[in-house]
Image: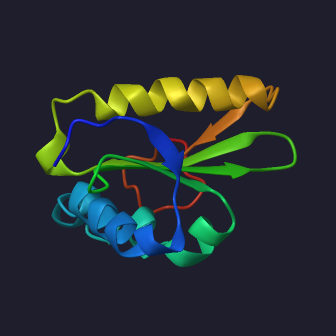
Amino acid sequence: MTDDMSIRPATAADVPRVKAVTDAAYHHYIERIGVVPVPMEADHGANVAAGRVFVTGDPVSGVLVLVPEADHLFLDSIAVHPDAHGRGVFNGWLFSAYYCIRACRCVSVGLRCSGRLGVRGGNG
């Protein structure tokens, strides 16, 4: 795994690694919340094809999913492979999301911050 933290749009060739990183990042929540977290069940291929997924690392170690909505930008998922923890990937994604939000001139951002991670649209 290299320390290359450049960010790029995901391609179809990245889909298996996008799934692997997402699964590795969220798997530990299954026992805690009792359900599979929503990001693990996402249609990664469709999200990549729609231009919603950005990746970093070689091989991919970080995944950011941004979904533009009519009145806001939805930060659907930030996933960092456990092997990349402590390398600043998560903080890099937060800064990247911030700049995307500003570039889109969004007045609000939607987040999945439910303690259960399995409830779509949760904000509790």
Q: Is residue 77 above or below residue 103?
A: below
Q: Quadrant of residue 90?
A: top left
Question: Residue shown at 55%/43% (left/top)?
Answer: 123
Q: Is residue 102 left or right of residue 76?
A: right
Q: Is residue 97 above or below residue 54?
A: above
On screen, residue 53 above or below 110: below
Q: Nearer the viewer, residue 35 or 110?
A: 110
> Can residue 33 be seen at all in this image of the molecule?
no
Q: Residue 117 appears at what percent x and percent y?
A: 40, 55
Q: Is residue 80 left or right of residue 77?
A: left
Whether residue 39 is visible = yes
Query: In front here: 68 or 1?
Result: 1
Q: Position of residue 16 (x, y in %)?
A: 36, 75
Percent coordinates x, y for residue 104 in the rendering: 79, 32
Left/right of residue 83 with respect to residue 26 in the rendered view: left
Q: Residue at x 60, y 67 (%)?
A: 47
Q: Residue at x 60, y 54 (%)?
A: 121
